[in-house]
Amino acid sequence: MRRRSGDVAIDDYLSTIYRLEEVFGTARTSDIAEELGVRPASVSKVLKKLASEGYVTWSKFRGFKLTEKGVNLAQPIIRKHRICEAFLSELGFDLIESHRYAHYMEHLPQQIVESIHRFIGSPKTCPHGNPIPGESSSSVGRPLIEYDAGEVVRVVGYRGELATYLRKAIEAGLTVGTVIEIVNKQKLGIDVRVGGELRRLNSKIAKTVLALPDNGGNLTSSPL
């Protein structure tokens, strides 16, 4: 399904909705537009078409979700993308680069991607900590938003590997391996201590950053 709408392939819309659902439960027009780098008006037009063809459903107060038909098309794309990310990570590309370049590789023939998967040891998750569809796995860690004030955690990944929030998290110093303390939780986000500095994260970033409890308590940053 490589039809195009403007400069964006339809399957890119489906895979983006899939990732947004992983993080937020639904996909809103504004988030899709930001992730794909297109205008919200263009997104609305494509979504109406996808809904009419049975790939997505829409709820007035929640947003868009993939139907079973949409999931069946999106999952193979996500699988290939995350396998390619794992391969690129093995080659030394960082998390932003591996996500970007995997996009160009995700339309390789399935046979080639499956051979890559076996070659790198059949990983169950991508380097961002997200499950590779078909591997009976789950995300590594829990979103920051689920931890309570006073808990100390270590960043282990980025849910949904959404380019927008991946970059924002890294710019905020939340690189993989960084130990942070949850200082305060509010309705619109959380306050965290990173490397001795207090930072406020909005709820969207806090939902994308994956972490595990850390018992060392050494609040220092690690390189990406």
Image: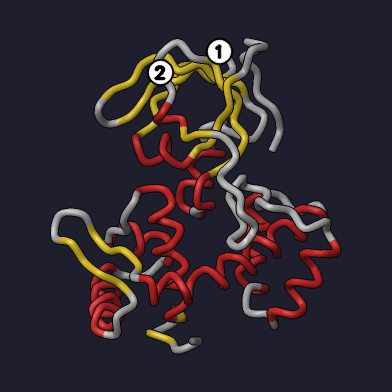
Amino acid type at circle 1 is: Gly
Amino acid type at circle 2 is: Asp
Tell me the quarter of the picture where residue 26 sits: bottom left
Query: Residue 112: image x %, image y %?
Result: 77, 78
Closer to us: 115 or 39: 115
The residue carrying mark 1 is: 196
> In the image, which disc is placed on residue 148?
2
- Please tell me whether mark 2 sits on a helix, a strand or a loop: loop
Relative placement, left or right, of 18 versus 185 is right
Q: CA distance from mark 2 to mark 1?
A: 19 Å
Q: Residue at x 75, y 53 (%)?
A: 89
Query: Residue 82: image x %, image y %?
Result: 64, 60
Q: Residue at x 48, y 42 (%)?
A: 168
Relative placement, left or right, of 196 versus 17 is right
Tell me the quarter of the picture where residue 58 sits: bottom left
Q: Residue at x 75, y 80 (%)?
A: 111
Mark 2 or 1, which is nearer the eye?
2
- Please tell me whether mark 1 sits on a helix, a strand or a loop: loop
Q: Quadrant of the C terminus?
A: top right
Query: Residue 134: image x %, image y %?
Result: 61, 62
